[in-house]
Image: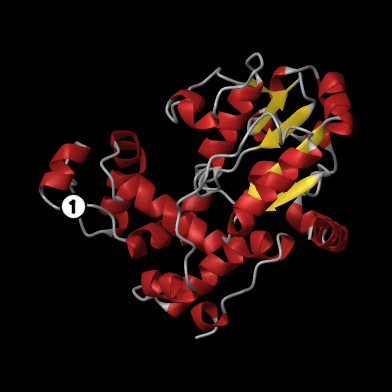
């Protein structure tokens, strides 16, 4: 399975480098900002590119524990809030370029991906259906006033929730596919395209895990890293979603907007071997 996933990546990247690497030719062309999702563990020679909404809290727990001394703690004993704080990890972009290149060449590099449209639903539920002041302030209010028919949305997330106001899933999709929004720079990482976070056409990964086969992949990866006796990947309780689940969410989204959305995330679908859900995008 690993060989197939890596082979697909190689074929896709070789076939259309321009599309998948944002026109960038090498590491030199990339800014520090574009490399801020790479966590480095120098003790074990590992680099993990984390993608929000793809088991990233649990993998960060594992990376955190690996940085402590042995015997390792149970990753689940580490608070999820702690691993999302700034400066908890050593990031790849904190090293000088020559050192960065050497680490990328010699360390074991891995990432985990997920069906792009299920990931979007997960991001929407997490950031807009829960009381989250940061996301409400920075995105929710804007989305409501632009697409939600709310010229003057409540100031705080508490007021918004008290009056039952939050962006609908369709409002969120309208925001993503709005050509005007593109001028505002890259997407927030929770809905940024996975290949734009981890650059799989510029960086050759040793392991490509999928959320859909998370427990098996995690076990295999820890075995490859010779850590299977030292550390256990936390069990995941996220129920695997059925095709109907996605359809239900997208019922309110007109076909034209679904197609625009597909174009935005087509790179992720093709690079990581996901199926294009025809019933969703072909009408």
Relative placement, left or right, of 58 versus 102 is left
Scheme of colours in the image: secondary structure
Name which residue lies at 84% across and 26% down.
Answer: 103
Q: Position of residue 107 (x, y in %)?
A: 83, 30
Q: Position of residue 53 (x, y in %)?
A: 51, 47
The answer to whether residue 166 is above or below residue 245 is above
Relative placement, left or right, of 12 versus 22 is right
Q: How many marks?
A: 1
Kindly indicate the quadrant of the structure image that contains residue 134. top left
Q: Position of residue 102 (x, y in %)?
A: 88, 25
Residue tagged by mark 1? 165
Q: Quadrant of the N terminus?
A: bottom right
- Taking the image as drawn, is residue 214 in sight? yes
**Which of 82 and 30 lies nearest the eye of the viewer?**
82
The answer to whether residue 220 is above or below residue 227 is below
Q: Position of residue 42 (x, y in %)?
A: 76, 20
Give the class, few, some or many, for how many residues have Cα within 10 Å of label 1's Cα (few <14, many ≥20).
Answer: some
- In what element is the residue under mark 1? loop
Relative placement, left or right, of 192 versus 256 is right
Kindly indicate the quadrant of the structure image that contains residue 224. top right
Q: Residue furthest front?
A: 229
**Which of 224 and 191 lies nearest the eye of the viewer?**
224
């Amino acid at each position: 399975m690993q060989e197939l996933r890596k082979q697909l990546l190689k074929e896709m990247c070789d076939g259309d480098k321009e599309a998948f690497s944002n026109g960038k030719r090498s590491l030199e062309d990339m800014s520090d900002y574009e490399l801020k999702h790479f966590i480095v563990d120098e003790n074990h020679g590992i680099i993990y590119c984390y993608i929000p909404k793809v088991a990233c809290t649990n993998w960060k727990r594992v990376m955190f524990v690996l940085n402590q001394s042995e015997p390792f703690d149970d990753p689940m004993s580490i608070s999820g809030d702690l691993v999302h704080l700034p400066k908890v990890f050593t990031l790849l972009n904190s090293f000088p370029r020559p050192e960065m290149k050497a680490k990328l060449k010699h360390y074991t590099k891995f990432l985990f991906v997920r069906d792009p449209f299920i990931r979007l639903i997960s991001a929407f539920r997490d950031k807009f259906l829960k009381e989250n002041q940061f996301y409400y302030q920075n995105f929710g209010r804007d989305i409501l006033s632009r697409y939600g028919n709310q010229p003057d949305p409540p100031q705080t997330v508490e007021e918004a929730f008290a009056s039952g106001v939050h962006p609908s899933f369709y409002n969120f999709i309208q925001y993503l596919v709005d050509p005007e929004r593109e001028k505002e720079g890259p997407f927030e990482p929770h809905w940024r395209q996975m290949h734009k976070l981890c650059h799989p056409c510029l960086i050759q990964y040793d392991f490509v895990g999928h959320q859909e086969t998370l427990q098996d992949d995690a076990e295999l990866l820890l075995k490859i890293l010779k850590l299977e006796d030292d550390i256990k990947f936390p069990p995941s309780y996220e129920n695997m979603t059925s095709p109907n689940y996605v359809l239900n969410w997208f019922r309110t989204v007109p076909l034209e907007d679904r197609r625009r959305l597909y174009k935005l995330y087509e790179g992720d679908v093709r690079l990581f071997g996901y199926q294009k859900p025809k019933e969703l995008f072909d009408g």
